[in-house]
Image (cartoon, coloured by chain):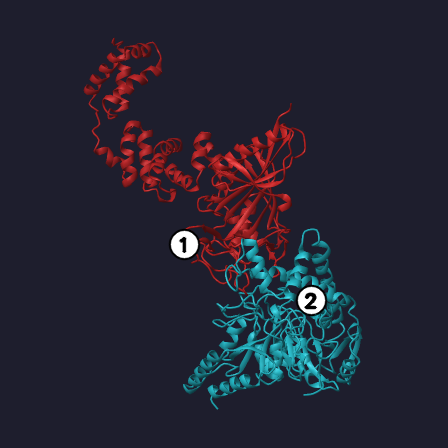
Amino acid sequence: MSYFDEIKNYLERIKKQDKYNAFLEIFEQRALNKAEELDERKKRGEKLGNLAGIPVAVKDNILVKGEKFTCGSKILEGFVAPYSATVVEKLEAADAVIIGRTNMDEFAMGSSTENSAYGPTKNPHDLKRVAGGSSGGSAAAVAGDLVPVALGSDTGGSIRQPAAFCGVLGFKPTYGAVSRYGLVAFASSLDQIGVFAKDPDLLESVFDVIYGVDEKDETSHKIDTSPKNVAFQRIEGYPKIGVPKEFLNCSQEVREIFEKALKGFNIVEISLPHTEYAVAVYYIVAPSEASSNLARFDGVRYGRRIEGDDLISTYSKTRGHGFGEEVKRRIMIGTFSLSSGYYDAYYLKAQKVRTLIAEDFRDAFKKVDYIVTPTTPTPAFKIGEITDPLSLYLQDVYTIPASLAGLPAISIPAGKTKDGLPVGLQIIGKRNSDFMLLFHDIFYFTGEK
Amino acid sequence: MSEYVPAIGLEVHVQLKTKSKMFCSCSTDFGAPPNTNICPVCTGQPGVLPTKNKKAIELAIRAGLVLNCKIQKYSLFARKNYFYPDLPKAYQISQYELPISKEGFLMVGDKKIRIIRAHLEEDAGKLLHYIGSTPVDGSLVDLNRCGIPLLEIVSYPDIDSPQMAFDYLKTLRRLLRYAGISDCDMEKGSLRCDCNVSVRKIGEKLGVKTEIKNMNSFKEVKDALTYEIERQTKVLKEGGKIFQETRLWNPKQGKTFAMRRKEEAHDYRYFPDPDLRPIFLSEEMISEQKKQIPELPADRKKRYTEMGLSEYQADVIIDEKELADYFEKVAENSNPCEAANIIITHLLRQINEKNIPYSQIPLNPQNLSELVNLKTDGKITPQIIKRIFPEMFEKNENPKKLLENIEVVSDEGEIKKIVMDAIQKNAQAWNDYKAGNEKASGRIIGFVMKQTEGSADPVKVKKILEELKNENFDS
């Protein structure tokens, strides 16, 4: 089959079968053009890239030049991306086919994709339930077999939590392993682009293309690649796996599935004492950075502008109408935390505790090779079920600590509940050990294969 | 009643001399059509990230060194958050808690003005207002300037008069231009200055300050300060109160006007910019910049006065590095004092009249030093220099060649006739001269030169005068 036909099939499938509201838009022309180009180059006997013909869906906070772009928000209505993110350039250079953009919580703020201005994404395992968030569209697209692989972004769990809810692999690399250039910043010190897939080999191949130092992103850095060469070599004995006792206050069913998945492993109980403050720290640091990052959406240069009587009222009308409730709430929290007179008590204090959390992990990794936790306290909840923002924030209680410490972490399917809902298991690795995390046997020890 | 004295601190922004902007690769060229030197980064498109300009950091180190600052080996960029249409990201990347250099000083004459800090930041764009006009009715923004690297140099309130503020700015400008850090051209916006000023009675602690903005020249800075000091003094003498506020200078009215009070001031919500890694400076980077520092104005002045130049001459010559360099080339092959003299009287006049930058002086130093030598050898009179200089300057001519075309009266008989005529017409001067007043001869020589349009050989004129004096010639 030609690349063209294959891509055409994918496009048809998405059009017909996306009952999840996973995609906000498919890039039909772009995808078919690329497929055609690949067929021609193949005919000429040219060598094609490592990801030739693989359709990749992209979360709508990663820019694809010439395509519409919303971040799940009304405020960017009509905006067309003027450039491509580094990851998109790298994928296209490896001959992947960027097939469309996926739904998300507005500006990646949320844990259910219910905060999208374009309607919630439904969970392919149960359409009444959420797909998780904020990268719910990408998770559902992969879970629903619309695409084999998708990009997401993870700030406090936005890849791992929807991956767990949708029963797919969701990998958040080490902070700085993948360039953030062209990812709309939510919380710059936490944001990281990552990958969803069902097939671990495909996930690894995509990560292999997108990772690496980017001169456009000062926070990008080198990660260890040597473990690649020793892939699938067993460390003597089983790797030592630490299970932090603070991470087991989940639902009974999740706990049972988690414990079953870990049977036979060399388990060590560990403690990460400061992680009890992780959610509190996160909801100071992330909104603070967001309040500054999102200030540029002011209607002056791009996006939707609502004219007021003067400059200030134009700002407030544009932003008042353009942003949704949750985004506004976090901008308010962040603005407050950074205000003079409160900065020391909130932002500065939170950064100090963040350091303590990172030190907890460093200490723990002196004793163990990996840290394993449930990805979420519960399986996917029903759409509309949780309305209290604080309860939603607690969805990320197990994923936030690794984000604050900048560590690589992957959510893998660990099993299903009696109702057939997937449960995820999170493996956290040492800083820069991304390839080790992706290659190690640990993948194959868990639940369903 | 005791008098009030001012305390002035200056915040000077200078544009660092880099080819590209602070956080992207856009050009810093001045005068490009609006919104042509822009890219996704400096226009704050979604998803972009800043990356530091190495050259700007190097120049900031050099500036810290020439301002005698402590260079911080670890410094941070911070975000200064506020909304304004000329600020695309709605925050300016600046330095706050940990600036690249701090605690230095600048010598202004004999007075030491302490520097609080000199930190890096990016410039904002420019708003163009066309309210009520056609075809555009409203405001437009030009982002060419947005992201241009700036160094903000903040002084302590050690400046105690508007004149000293003026001298501080001149000294600072000269220093930064010498060291190749900034052009400091106020007209092109590469130097801007805000003033903090308060007044107090002698011996009292600092009074409430106001900040004055919108001065477009060093002279306006001086004028604005003079006005503001008078205003504050008057308010206090009448028992009033000074409010901490920002005031705008209106050059047309020669007054400052209140813009916003402290309580209306922005809360900039500074925090370290998470997109930028801290600046780590190595010993090598700092010593490399030390090597890049040329001889600075104060050292040159010292050297020039040791060469015999007067304070005044030295001051004029060192004012611009390019002029001083030119002077040195001339002085290499001629007498420095005479060279300085001719440069100040003749060269600068041509340069000012024709508005030529120092970098484009048409007359080469070699030709000028020949002229200087002719003068010191007594082979040419000031009058002749005056006559030939414009042509020599413009065409870069050798002075000897120009002299060929000038008829020099050197026939002693002829000169003697003219001198005797001059003596007759200046009898008093002649008598004084004979009586021993050497200076009186000047009037007679001047008369001769006038008669001959400067073409009489002055050595011969002098010789004849002396002969006539010895002969006790009578008018």
Badge 2 marks a residue whose secondary structure is helix
Instruction: Name above or below for residue B400 compared with residue B134.
Output: above
Q: Is residue A275 left or right of residue A221?
A: right
Please identify, in this view, whether the residue under mark 1 or under mark 2 is nearer the observer: 1
Q: Residues within 10 Å of mark 2 (few under 14, many from 20)?
A: many
Task: Indicate the position of residue A56 as horizontal and vertical percent values.
Answer: 55, 79
Residue situated in front as seen by the camera: A14 or A383: A383
Q: In what quadrant of the picture does the C terminus of chain A appear?
A: bottom right
Q: Which residue is mark 2?
A: A404
- Chain coloured cyan in this rendering: A
Task: Indicate the position of residue A179 as horizontal and vertical percent values.
Answer: 57, 69
Chain letter of mark 1 equals B
Residue at 44 percent across and 47 percent down: it is B188
Task: Indicate the position of residue A161 as horizontal and vertical percent values.
Answer: 68, 76
User: Which amino acid is tagged 2?
Assistant: Leu
The answer to whether residue B109 is visible is no
**Farthest bottom residue?**
A1
Residue at 49 percent across and 56 percent down: it is B21
- Please tell me the numbered disc located at residue B54: none
Residue at 57 percent across and 85 percent down: it is A17
- Chain coloured red in this rendering: B
Q: Residues within 10 Å of mark 1 (few under 14, many from 20)?
A: few
Q: CA distance from mark 1 to mark 2?
A: 44 Å
The answer to whether residue B425 is visible is yes
- Please tell me the numbered disc located at residue B32: 1
The reply to whether the C-beta atoms of the residues labelled 1 and 2 are less than 8 Å apart is no
User: Which amino acid is tagged 1?
Assistant: Ala
Badge 1 marks a residue whose secondary structure is loop
Q: Quadrant of residue A117?
A: bottom right
